[in-house]
Image (tube, helix red, strand yellow):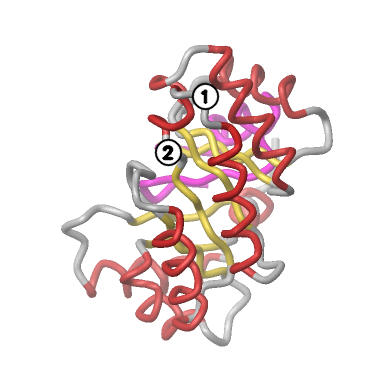
Amino acid sequence: MHSSKELAARTELVLVRPDAVRMEIDTLCRHARENGFRGVCVNSSRVAEAFAVLEDSDVKVISTIGFPDGTADSDVKRYETEVAIDHGAQEFEVALNVGRLKDAEDGTLLRELYDILEAAEERPVSLIFQPNHLNRDQQILVCRLAVESGIKVVSVACGDLETIKFVREAVGSKFGIKACDEIYGSQQATEWLEAGATLLATTILPEF
């Protein structure tokens, strides 16, 4: 079992509800700072507020890009990345365009990821997808696109251990996997890590 400190250092707190208010962002960031969490993930419009609280800390400010459905034009996603950097973002969670994936537009998706990586200027980028929207072949394709593009982490939006194990097999032993869901405690977090996740992200405050 990992210690509470070790788990917090590998866990990001997520607040991307469209109705989240400034006070909630501020409170979450202060909690992350005081308890040694790895990062705080917010929508791009809230990056400046998160950065104002976390600027002098080790907690990463993570911005969503194209969230939640990934359907924005590629140029819009690139611009969103550039603006988020100006506001203090240090890492990014890019939402996959599922429709283009299902249309087998691999080249379009790769060009989009290349553009976002270029805009990020070597800042870490994760590609997030929801497995329940995709069959297994499509999940493998997501993983292949992430690896081929140069992205270092895929974010799996579910707490299904079997899916995490499946993605681990798809990306190989050295690729990053972020498991994103509700984390309630140390045992659940440890199970996700043992299944193959390297990072965790939770939409509720975990009790480690």
Residue at position x 44%, y 76% in the image: 83
Q: 10 Å neighbourhood of mark 2: few (<14), some, or many (≥20)?
A: many
Closer-to-camera residue (176/143): 143
Report if residue 45 lies within the magenta region.
no
Answer left or right for 167 relative to 73. Answer: right
* Residue type for callout 2: Asn
Pick the quarter of the image with the N terminus: top right
Disc 2 + disc 1, Cβ < 8 Å = no
Residue 100 in the image: state x and y as whole percent: 44, 32
Name the N-terminal-most of marks 2 and 1.
2
Residue 13 in the image: state x and y as whole percent: 45, 55
| Label number found at residue 97 | 2
| Label number found at residue 115 | none
Of helix, strand and loop, which one carries label 1?
A: loop
Residue 61 in the image: state x and y as whole percent: 51, 69
Residue at position x 43%, y 57% in the image: 65
Of helix, strand and loop, which one carries label 2?
A: loop
Q: Is residue 14 above or below residue 153?
A: below
Q: Is residue 114 above or below residue 84?
A: above
Q: Quadrant of residue 64?
A: bottom left
| Label number found at residue 104 | 1
Answer left or right for 124 relative to 59. Answer: right
- Give the magenta-colored segment's residue range: 182-208
